[in-house]
Image (cartoon, grey):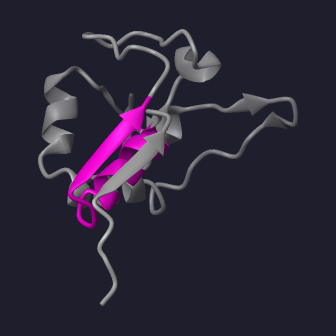
Amino acid sequence: MMQRETHAIIIGGSLAGLLAARVLAKHFDRVSIVERDFFPEKPAPRPGIPQSRHLHILLNRGKIILEEFFPGLENELVAAGAPSLDPRSIGWFSPAGWAPLFSPDLNDLIRAC
């Protein structure tokens, strides 16, 4: 008989780390996240994350998946002040130039985080 592992350790408390912890919580008795920064009490950039000051968006498919893992997340985001944006109203400029506008059939909801 194989012994079940009881403790998972995640290195990094980024969104990817937090999601990995959520998934592993179904399979381990205990999950620990090791993070060098403190999580702020209110929304604020984190010192160890250079891109934390950038605009971040949550596309519709990601919202659906996150809502499955964290029921009520969308309502919490709205209550915390996350604005809804029309994807056709966002222009994306990069070193390669302006990106094409999003198609509403692909992304009918975007949340700025």
Q: Is residue 94 above or below residue 50?
A: below
Residue furthest to the bottom: 1
The residue at the point 32 percent across, 54 percent down is 7
> What residue do we see at 41% from left, 46% from top?
9
Q: Residue 65, how many percent across, how many down?
A: 33, 60
Residue found 44% across the figure and 48% down from its top: 59
Magenta-highlighted residues? 15-34
**Foreground residue among 110 and 14:** 14
Task: Name the spot of residue 99 as percent of width and height, x first.
Answer: 73, 41
Q: Residue at x 25, y 10 (%)?
A: 41
Quadrant hosting residue 47? top right
Question: Looking at the image, is 58 positioned above or below residue 20?
Answer: above
Q: Is residue 38 magenta?
A: no
- In the image, residue 32 sits, relative to residue 47, either above or below, namely below
32 or 39, nearer to the observer: 32
Magenta stretch contains residue 22: yes
Residue 26 falls left or right of residue 48: left
Q: Quadrant of the N terminus?
A: bottom left
Res 24 seen here: yes
Residue nearest the viewer, comparing 82 with 15? 15
Q: How many marks on residues?
A: 0
Q: Position of residue 35 (x, y in %)?
A: 45, 26
Left or right: 100, with 16 as reference point: right
Q: Is residue 96 above or below residue 38?
A: below
Q: Is residue 58 visible?
A: no
Measured as percent of width and height from the top left, residue 38 is found at 39, 14
Between 96 and 80, the one nearer to me in the picture: 80
Q: Is residue 1 left or right of residue 11?
A: left
